[in-house]
Image (cartoon, rainbow, N blue to C red):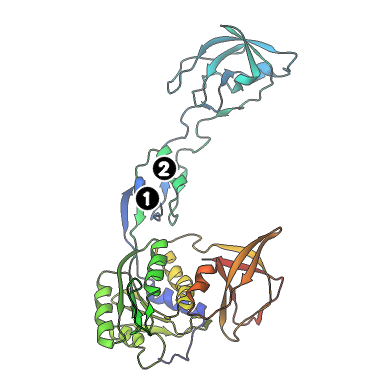
Amino acid sequence: MKLLKVDTIQQVLEKMEYHFGDIELKGEVINIEVAVGRTAKEDTFSQYNIPDFNRSTVDGYAIVASDTFGVTDSIPVFLDVIGQVEMGKSTDIVISKGKAAYVPTGGMVPKGADAVIMIEHIEEMDSSTIAAYSSTAPGENVIKIGDDISKGDQLIHKGKQIRPQDIGVLTAAGIRQITVFEKPKAAVISTGDEIADPFGEIQYGEVRDINTYTLAAMLEEMGAAVTIKSVIKDEYELLKSAVEAALIDNHIVIISGGSSVGTKDVTAKVIESMGEPGVFVHGMAVKPGKPTIVGKAMGKALFGLPGHPVSAVIVFKVLIGHFMARLMNKENFKLQIPAVCSVNVHSSPGKETFQMVELEQTENGYAAIPLHGKSGAISLVSRAQGFVRIPHNKEGISKGETVMVELL
């Protein structure tokens, strides 16, 4: 397969959908204490009304609201106090016209009452009488049965990434366990004779390993479990053995480097050797990231990413992020915000161009400030808050044009 026969991003995504459509994740039941960041595999519904009793939102007196209609600071109404509600306990008090009962915040509103007047708006005349100095509407300061959540309401839907506030909703409904997608298992293999341990001494001409750690972190950020992180020399047999081992227990295998057409670029050959269908994409009409490989073997997804860090990050976001989101039925895996481009930006003819940008707060929103540098410059990725896509049929972006920035 010739590298020059490139596909557009849309064509690559369509091929991925066709070849990867049968790759699925199992579900697992976990306690909600460890569910933050995981993705729900099924819808979850409430079995209860929340609250399941009429509850006061203030410290005050449960009353019949019509008793206070027309009341002012100078014309109060006097009500008989017939009891008080204890926090966390039910009550058999019944409120009728002209009557009132003290209720603490969160306490049960007695039957017959349709409002609670705040304690700040009453005066205790004696132990059994209060004067109310404010008009109160029906339903005021009361959360009614099911006002928050009704029995049968959907609490969590499939594909939702669980957040801390979702844990609060689940505990309110008494739900201890939920079913989530298993974590996609992924292996990251970097190739290159020049790649060295980033934390040790390096020889002149070697470069510290960047992509293994960057790509593994991106995988984990999206919810994957990274099982392998390794660096392999540019030798066919070594890389083949590493990929064969990685395919056994992973859904995704990423090979960083060796995706071009040089004499030592063997990634495509290795993927082809793994079995059908092998490589189905070798070359993508994007800048940066043209020498991208996508394949499948043993029912697993294989990606050959360019060795340059900027290219690798872009291709990850566009392809692997998309694939992982589909695996977990994730919603809104792309975060985008509008921004005004600060300068003219030229694109690469015939290719979808990705321009890294910084974001700057302005009076009217955000400004997108293009960052320029070679695709091998990791500082470019670190400085950027996101990137802008320029379609293959667009010459560039004009200064002052509003663009959508996809956040990193």
**Which type of secondary structure does the marked residue at label 1 adopt?**
loop
Between 185 and 19, the one nearer to me in the picture:
185
Q: How crowded is mark 1: few (under 14 residues within 10 Å), some or many (20 or more)?
A: many
Q: How crowded is mark 2: few (under 14 residues within 10 Å), some or many (20 or more)?
A: some
Indicate the position of residue 63 as horizontal and vertical percent values: 59, 18
Does label 1 or label 2 sit earlier along the sequence? Answer: 1
> Which residue in the structure is indicated by mark 1?
35
Q: In this view, does 62 lie to the left or right of 90?
A: right
Q: What residue type is labelled 1?
A: Ala
Indicate the position of residue 348 as horizontal and vertical percent values: 59, 84
Q: Which residue is drawn at 54% across and 68% down?
A: 383
Viewer-nearest of labels 1 and 2? 1
Q: Which residue is drawn at 48% across and 72% down?
A: 318
Q: What residue type is labelled 2?
A: Leu
Q: Is residue 332 above or below residue 175?
A: below
Between 208 and 7, the one nearer to me in the picture:
208
Say if residue 166 shows up in the picture.
yes
Q: In this view, does 261 lie above or below 15?
A: below
> Which residue in the structure is indicated by mark 2?
170
